[in-house]
Image (cartoon, rainbow, N blue to C red):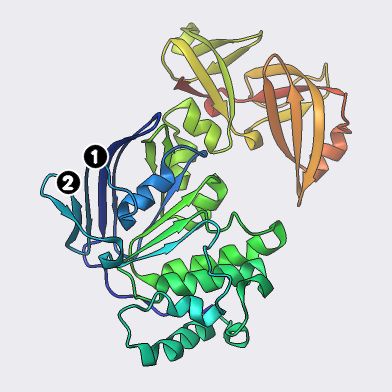
Amino acid sequence: MNAEPTASAGTGLGVDARTRLGELALDVALEVAAGECLALAGASGAGKTSVLRTVAGLLRPEHGRVVCGGEVWLDTAGGVDRAPERRRCGYLFQEYALFGHLSAWRNVAYGLHETPRGEREARARALLERFGLAPRADARPATLSGGERQRVALARALARRPHALLLDEPLSALDARTRAAATRELGGVIRAAGVPVLLVTHDFAEAALLGDRVAVMDGGRVLQEGTASALAATPASAFVADFTGAVVLTGRARRGAGDVIVVALDGGGEATALAGEEGAVAVSVYPWEITLARPGEAAHDSARNHLDVDVLSVTTVGTRVRVGLAAPQPLVAELSEASARELDLVRGGRAVASFKAAAARVLPL
């Protein structure tokens, strides 16, 4: 997919918004540099789409400011509120919001308000050609595949050469078969755009693939922001750890011998960590940091944490095997196929789950 670069966004995008939306109190402040993609990640209802709508002018917060490319789009204190059609941003809606009665090229041309009417068709068809859709330019959305509809919507979002690109769950409407190719193509569009990109997703893996940085949101606030690797390595809370795919165990921590932290896990068992605070805590560990052994077999490594578990499920994903485990609290381990075969893991079997104290991260609840 060859998407032409958009107009320069200058100093990037800044958004600061505080408002109440029913039970949700939105309170966010974000900066996105030109050419950078910031992925807003979190569960439904976290306030992610409300941030996009604030930037686009579809939601006016009680207190807020939006600046893009040095232009003030919103300043509630200064009485500035530029209309949505005068904010130069491309918006890809979650369900793409294509007009069913219009052909693909006419859907793209709909975004070309500033282009002379006589030039709109040629411009729209040229954009579709760059997205590999020239043969489908006269087709209506109902006859297009999910991936084709996504590309038409992207072409429309880029038609005005926006100063910012807003993507709301851009892959959620696609089936699993289409999603992998669409993810690669979307990554190319984001890199080529050259403008600040705000992308909303509920999937941390998707955020890690597409975002230069990830901001994890919950309850209308950003809980932690940074690269996906940094968030996974040093989550700031149990919520962030869980969202990044870690196993999260709750318990009560105390200081042990040698200044290690010993956590009495809720429901039974203990976990040892090298650092952390005392009191009610969570312990996070990633599935690939957990090893399994047969009951009664001594651990052959330096792991200090051992829990007796029941095997609930064994699922092969590519060359890895994910094993669902029941202890006083649920666990998931991720092994190689060879390790799983050697252990002869079956549903209903027993095992010992082990992980190193260095892998155990003690976090606030």
Please say whether residue 3 is visible from this viewpoint: no
Quickly name the residue at label 2.
76
Which residue lies at the image location 44% right of the left edge and 11% below the top edge?
259
Which residue lies at the image location 69% right of the left edge and 22% below the top edge?
330
104 versus 206 height, above or below: below
- Mark 1: which secondary structure? loop
Which amino acid is tagged 1? Glu
Q: Position of residue 183 (x, y in %)?
A: 57, 62
Q: Residues within 10 Å of mark 2 (few under 14, many from 20)?
A: some
Name the residue nearer the viewer: 314 or 259.
314
357 versus 2 height, above or below: above
Task: Name the quadrant of the N terminus.
Answer: bottom right
Which residue lies at the image location 37% right of the left edge and 79% below the top edge?
112
Quickly name the residue at label 1.
62
Q: Position of residue 229 (x, y in %)?
A: 47, 45
Residue farthest toward the left in the current orientation of the protein: 78
Q: Gap in Å between the C-alphas at discs 2 and 1?
A: 7 Å
Do the CB atoms of the residues marked 2 and 1 lie less than 8 Å apart?
A: yes
Q: Where is residue 18 in the image (x, y as percent from the top left)?
A: 27, 38
Name the residue nearer the viewer: 222 or 172.
172
